[in-house]
Image: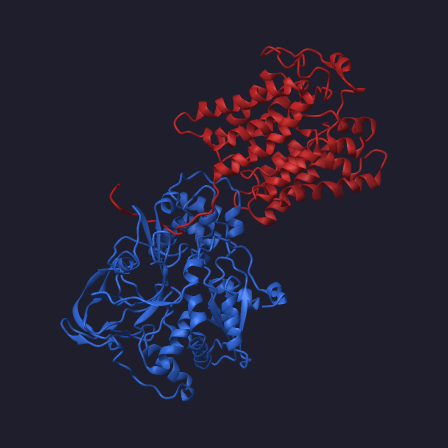
């Protein structure tokens, strides 16, 4: 990594620099977690229509077998994460806080838990773009970065929006998380194979991997692996939250801006997360479904933090039992601390979109219980907002319940709730919460 | 050991290590060197006046906010210290206390308290006493006068609601150098003699308590700018508005109009630009708004100084800038 490249690193304007807290987990290799006795697999764990269950109560399934089918194009199938027997299909708690229809699977304890169900595909090099898109859907792939948007939909842009660039998101800008970092270090071949498949599927000629410059070892590993590949480049970008948000990363890598309210495809770009592409590169050639994922389990409340391969559907209570946790006041966060939701129920399962399980405890949690002061118009939120909004003004309008004005005059809908404003607000005003309420209100009243 | 509790929090779960109290406390710390310099220059009278003004501000805040503790946020102390720094050294303490009452009562509480004030509260207090006591507010005392740590300026302890005694003769007696009783701005305006920049930088000229040394003001301001408590664009924009417009008039008639450097270093421009215009509440939040605001203050200051009846225009320029700030910019 030369000095020149350091200086040339791309970035976007505004944003924040929270402490990374990644060292502990980033330094250790990915380990495998045991199977829980019972897995909970929500049918709606991706964006789009929930999958349709294919199994009945009491039925035996083997690991890798499809247990739910895609319901339409913007939907994906689900594969059994373990060999076992279907205990029930019923409402179970999920990360979103509401109960959701889920397949409950009793795992056979004595089983070796090898993947026993594959749907072999032809040699990946011979697949047509349509066949790749189909195969990506067939393995149940969604964005593993957290959004859980079906990957095959992203890889099939509409004909009127030709794309020419694949941006591969290896920023992992959320503090504490390091699963993408470890995947880049340990599975560069899978990642590159996944990138090549995605490029062929979407018909793009070039791909850029954007990695925050606190992970220069990953940049080096990928650049080394890509020596003979002129179409794919790995580039370091500034370490700054929310660098991993797709609009920010596109700006940093290409200098282009996605129009307000638009999608990256509007400017000929598709964005995929490194974890997703590495999983495609690993699973698609084998015809294997997505049954597990790498999850960063960390935080001051975790005794043995690390990156673990966790079977999908594992209740977080089981994960915590395996890694050990402590604290009298504990905030369990699914994902990173900036955008991840708190969960109240330890039966909540790890799903396809869960990148991290963060346990903040005692002092970490209690020091966030602070007095809310009036807005002093310091403007720190304005300097932090990566979407160049005016969170101070939006916050004041929210208090006055002028929700439609927020959307019409102050671009509320461009806010993607990254949390920079609330992080930096010296008055501790819960700005993100205000904006969520406003958006929900507007959605309800638009209908 | 209490029962384990699962805390449910809205995102983000982490927060920057600062808050309103820390910011305000830092501003107080940053203004203390200026207060210390003014006490060094004017002795016991300055100390007494500062205590009177700050106490008056705190009592007023307490009086109007009996039910929630708003004193702990340090913002009232800032108003008190800044107001003190805008007053002339021999200002009667009772007038200072009245200024403090008006600053907090009219400048802040009446608008709804912390964060709601449209104008800089300290300048509201100062504007009030400027209108109410035009003589006392323009009576200057020589800095470093003899015996400043053993005796008070005769006007300091004027009984409330009485006219302060004449201090001109007394000033002549105690002054270490020849003392004209006029500020550099007044001397320039009426006699067209600009004070040397070095005197302005080191604070050996007549003026308000906080107008003494531009160097100390600059150092305190830079500290806040580096801590990112003060928006560095505001003082820069104020100066960028002042200097060229002053230079323009200086170029038209150097005999009448002073040069840009004199304009920058004299009077209340430095403390105004660094500590008054930067008051977060009254200044804009967007980068562009901040630049327009600063330029406006700088230009209006020059216009008032050169063409207005008053010798100093920073205060009204900042109040005008506050008024011109839209709530969403």
Q: Position of residue B40 (x, y in %)?
A: 67, 24
Is residue A164 at all visible to an observer of this figure? no
In the rendered view, would you say B73 is above or below A256?
above
Q: Which residue is drawn at 24% across and 78% down?
A: A65
Q: Is residue B305 left or right of residue B26?
A: right
Q: Which of A411 and A235 is in front in this view?
A: A235
Report which colour depicts chain B: red
Q: Is residue B192 left or right of residue A70?
A: right
Is residue A386 at all visible to an observer of this figure? yes
In the rendered view, would you say B277 is above or below A13?
above
Q: Position of residue B148 (x, y in %)?
A: 69, 17
Q: Position of residue A109 (x, y in %)?
A: 19, 70
Report which colour depicts chain A: blue
Q: Residue at x 54, y 66 (%)?
A: A236
Q: Which of B317 and B49 is in front in this view?
A: B49
Q: Position of residue A94 (x, y in %)?
A: 27, 60
| Quadrant (top left/top right/bottom left/bottom right) for the N terminus of chain B | top left
Q: Is residue B318 left or right of residue B257?
A: left
Q: Residue at x 57, y 33 (%)?
A: B29
Q: Which of A159 and A213 is in front in this view?
A: A213
In the rendered view, would you say B123 is above or below A76?
above
Q: In which quarter of the image is residue B252?
A: top right
């Amino acid at each position: 990594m030369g000095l020149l490249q350091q200086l040339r690193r791309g970035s976007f304007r505004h944003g924040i620099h929270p402490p990374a807290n990644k060292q502990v987990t980033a330094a250790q290799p990915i380990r495998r977690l045991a199977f829980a006795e019972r897995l909970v697999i929500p049918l709606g764990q991706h964006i789009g229509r929930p999958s349709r269950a294919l199994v009945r109560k009491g039925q035996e399934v083997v690991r890798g077998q499809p247990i739910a089918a895609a319901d339409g194009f913007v939907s994906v199938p689900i594969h059994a994460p373990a060999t076992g027997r279907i205990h029930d299909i019923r409402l179970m708690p999920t990360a979103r806080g509401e109960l959701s229809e889920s397949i409950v699977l009793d795992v056979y304890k004595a089983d070796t838990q090898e993947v026993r169900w594959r749907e072999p595909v032809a040699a990946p090099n011979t697949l047509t773009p349509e066949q790749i898109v189909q195969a990506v859907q067939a393995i149940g792939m969604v964005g593993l970065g957290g959004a859980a948007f079906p990957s095959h939909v992203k890889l099939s842009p509409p004909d009127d929006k030709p794309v020419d660039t694949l941006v591969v998101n290896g920023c992992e800008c959320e503090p504490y998380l390091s699963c993408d970092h470890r995947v880049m270090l340990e599975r560069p071949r899978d990642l590159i194979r996944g990138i090549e498949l995605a490029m062929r599927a979407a018909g793009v000629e070039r791909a850029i991997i954007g990695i925050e410059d606190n992970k220069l070892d990953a940049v080096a590993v990928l650049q080394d692996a890509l020596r003979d590949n002129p179409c794919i480049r790995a580039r370091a970008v500034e370490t700054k939250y929310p660098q991993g948000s797709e609009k920010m990363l596109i700006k940093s890598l290409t200098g282009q801006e996605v129009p307000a309210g638009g999608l990256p495809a509007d400017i000929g770009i598709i964005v995929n997360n490194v974890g997703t592409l590495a999983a495609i590169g690993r699973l698609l050639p084998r015809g294997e479904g997505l049954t597990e994922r790498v999850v960063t389990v960390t935080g001051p409340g975790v005794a043995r933090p690390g990156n673990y391969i966790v079977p999908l559907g594992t209740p977080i209570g089981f994960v915590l039992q395996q890694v050990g946790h402590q604290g009298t006041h504990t905030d369990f966060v699914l994902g990173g601390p900036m955008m991840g939701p708190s969960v109240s129920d330890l039966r909540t399962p790890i799903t396809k979109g869960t990148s991290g399980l963060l346990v903040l405890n005692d002092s970490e949690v209690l020091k966030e219980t602070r007095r809310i002061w009036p807005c002093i118009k310091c403007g720190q939120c304005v300097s932090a907002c990566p979407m160049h909004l005016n969170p101070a003004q939006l916050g004041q309008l929210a208090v006055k319940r002028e929700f439609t004005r927020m959307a019409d005059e102050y671009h509320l809908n461009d806010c993607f709730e990254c949390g920079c404003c609330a992080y930096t607000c010296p008055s501790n005003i819960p700005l993100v919460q205000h904006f969520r309420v406003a958006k929900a209100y507007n959605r309800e009243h638009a209908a | 050991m209490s029962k384990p509790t699962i805390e449910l929090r809205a995102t983000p779960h982490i927060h920057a290590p600062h808050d309103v109290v820390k910011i305000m406390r830092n501003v107080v710390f940053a203004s203390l060197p200026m207060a210390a310099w003014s006490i060094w220059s004017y002795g016991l009278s300055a100390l007494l006046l500062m205590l009177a003004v700050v106490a008056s501000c705190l009592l007023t805040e307490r009086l109007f906010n009996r039910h929630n503790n708003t004193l702990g946020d340090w913002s009232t102390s800032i108003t008190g210290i800044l107001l003190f720094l805008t007053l002339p050294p021999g200002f009667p303490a009772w007038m200072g206390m009245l200024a403090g009452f008006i600053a907090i009562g009219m400048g802040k509480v009446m608008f709804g308290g912390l964060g709601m004030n449209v104008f800089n509260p300290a300048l509201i207090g100062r504007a009030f006493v400027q209108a109410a006591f035009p003589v006392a507010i323009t009576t200057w005392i020589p800095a470093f006068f003899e015996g400043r740590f053993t005796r008070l300026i005769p006007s300091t302890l004027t009984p409330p609601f009485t006219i302060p005694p004449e201090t001109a003769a007394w000033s002549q007696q105690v002054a270490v150098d020849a003392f004209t009783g006029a500020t550099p701005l007044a001397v320039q305006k009426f006699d067209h003699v600009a004070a040397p920049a070095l005197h302005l930088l080191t604070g050996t000229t007549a003026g308000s308590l906080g107008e003494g040394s531009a160097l100390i003001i600059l150092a305190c301001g830079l500290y806040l700018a580096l801590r990112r408590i003060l928006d560095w664009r505001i003082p820069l924009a104020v100066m960028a508005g002042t200097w060229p417009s002053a230079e323009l008039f200086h170029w038209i008639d150097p005999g009448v109009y002073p040069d840009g450097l004199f304009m920058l270093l004299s009077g209340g421009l430095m403390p105004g630009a660094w500590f008054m215009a930067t008051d977060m509440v009254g200044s804009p939040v967007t980068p562009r708004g901040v630049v327009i605001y600063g330029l406006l203050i700088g230009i209006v200051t020059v216009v008032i100084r050169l063409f207005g009846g008053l010798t100093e225009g920073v205060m009204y320029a900042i109040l005008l800038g506050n008024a011109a700030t839209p709530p969403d910019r």
